[in-house]
Amino acid sequence: MSEMEHKALEILARIAKRDASDLAPGQYLVADLSIDSPKALELLCDIEEECGFEIPDDAVNRLETVGDVIEMVNSFDRQAIA
């Protein structure tokens, strides 16, 4: 797991009030973790701040699962390296 993935999962765990070790890629943000729209925006803002990415506002609409969050972070991490 990359440092950015770890940071994102820690943020998600904090917002979902769960332990990061309990999160799995297939879990749904809304149904399984009770991440509503305000919490999803908080998630994106906190990831931006912690990881140094600028995430488009519409990215929240593409996030359905924990795996989607990890994939998003990885894509921005790869862009930052390139």
Image (cartoon, rainbow, N blue to C red):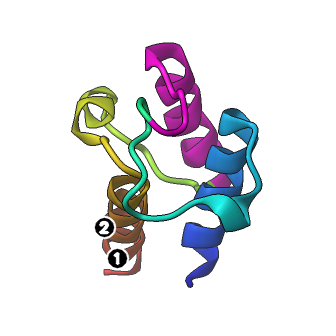
**Span colored in magenta:** 32-50
Q: Which residue was labeled with disc 1?
A: 78
Q: Nearer the viewer, residue 10 or 74?
A: 10
Marks 2 and 1 in Cβ contact (< 8 Å): yes
Q: Secondary structure at mark 2?
A: helix
State yes or no: residue 33 in magenta: yes
Residue 13, position as x, y percentages in the image: 69, 48
Where residue 32 sits: x, y (%)? 48, 39
Q: Label 1 crowding class (10 Å Cα cut-off): few <14, some 14-19, many 20+?
A: few
Look at the numbered disc 1 and give the secondary structure of its residue. helix
Of residue 4 and residue 79, the one placed in the foreground of this image is 4
Task: Pinpoint residue 39: horizontal percent, then vertical percent.
Answer: 56, 23
Q: Quadrant of the C terminus?
A: bottom left
- Relative to the observer, which residue lies in front, 33 or 38? 33
Q: Residue at x 75, y 37 (%)?
A: 17
Q: Residue furthest front?
A: 32
Q: Which mark is residue 75?
A: 2
Spatial distance from mark 2 to mark 1, Cα to Cα? 5 Å
Q: What residue is shown at x 34% (from left), y 76% (from top)?
A: 78
Q: What amino acid type should be assigned to the residue bearing mark 1?
A: Arg
For disc 2, the neighbor class at 10 Å (few under 14, some 14 to 19, many from 20) is: few
Q: Is residue 27 one of those drawn in magenta?
A: no
Name the amino acid, label 2.
Ser
Principal SS element in the magenta part? helix
Q: Quadrant of the N terminus?
A: bottom right
Can you say whether 58 is above or below 21 in the image? above
